[in-house]
Amino acid sequence: MPQNDLKALRRMDFEYTLPYRTRWSDNDQYSHINNSIYYHLFDSIVNTYLIESCGQEPQKSPSIGLVVSSWCEFFAPLSFPDILDLCLCVKKLGKSSVTYEIGVFKQGSDSPAAVGGYTHVFVDSQSRQSTVMSPAVRRGLEALLVTVTGKL
């Protein structure tokens, strides 16, 4: 998606929101959230959703999602002590893979400070071979599935 389109995203374009209170250690030497922290935020919202809404148990589930690609576009700086809203949707859902999109919003703002995402491929937790995602995971992810024109 072109950067201008990503910058135009609003909270209503996402299906799930998780608040995040920034920490002093999130800041870098320039007094804004370090770029690497955004990937921690992405991991937090995706895995919170998978645990709470899809029945995933990271230490026990027979399949797990491995990240095979990731990206992030930055539009505005954030820093401690900002409170953020992490917003999640699913852009593409396959049999064994899912592509997420995450908007990072400063609380009170409807414009994203950053938008990014990644693709999970579900694999057997022991063999690490690609596998079809479980029905519970698929149902949970279908609830977040959106199209260019909105929710399916």
Image (tube, helix red, strand yellow):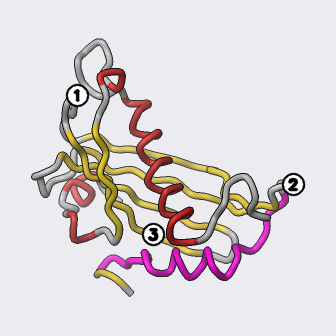
Residue drawn 56% across and 62% down? 51
**What's under tag 2, amino acid-wise?**
Gln
The circle drawn on residue 126 is: 2
Image location (x, y in percent) of residue 20: 31, 45
> Gap between marks 3 and 2, in whole Å?
26 Å
Q: Callout 3: helix, strand or loop? A: strand
Q: Is residue 112 left or right of residue 43?
A: left
Do the CB atoms of the residues marked 3 and 2 lie less than 8 Å apart?
no
Is residue 130 found left or right of 5 in the rendered image?
right
Outermost top residue: 29
Q: Nearer the viewer, residue 5 or 139?
A: 139
User: Which label was assigned to residue 80?
Assistant: 1
Identified at 52% across, 47% down, the residue is 70
Q: Write down the residue under mark 3.
A: 90
Q: Is residue 135 magenta?
A: yes
Is residue 21 positioned above or below 35 on the image?
A: below
Q: Amino acid at mark 3?
A: Val
Q: Give the left or right position of residue 107, taking residue 90 as reference.
A: left
Which contiguous range is marked in magenta?
A: 129-149
Callout 1 crowding tier (Cα within 10 Å): few <14, some 14–19, many ≥20: some
State the residue lying farthest toward the bottom.
152
Placement of 111 over or under 21, stated as above or below: below
The crowd level at tag 2 (other Cα within 10 Å; few <14, some 14-19, many 20+) is few
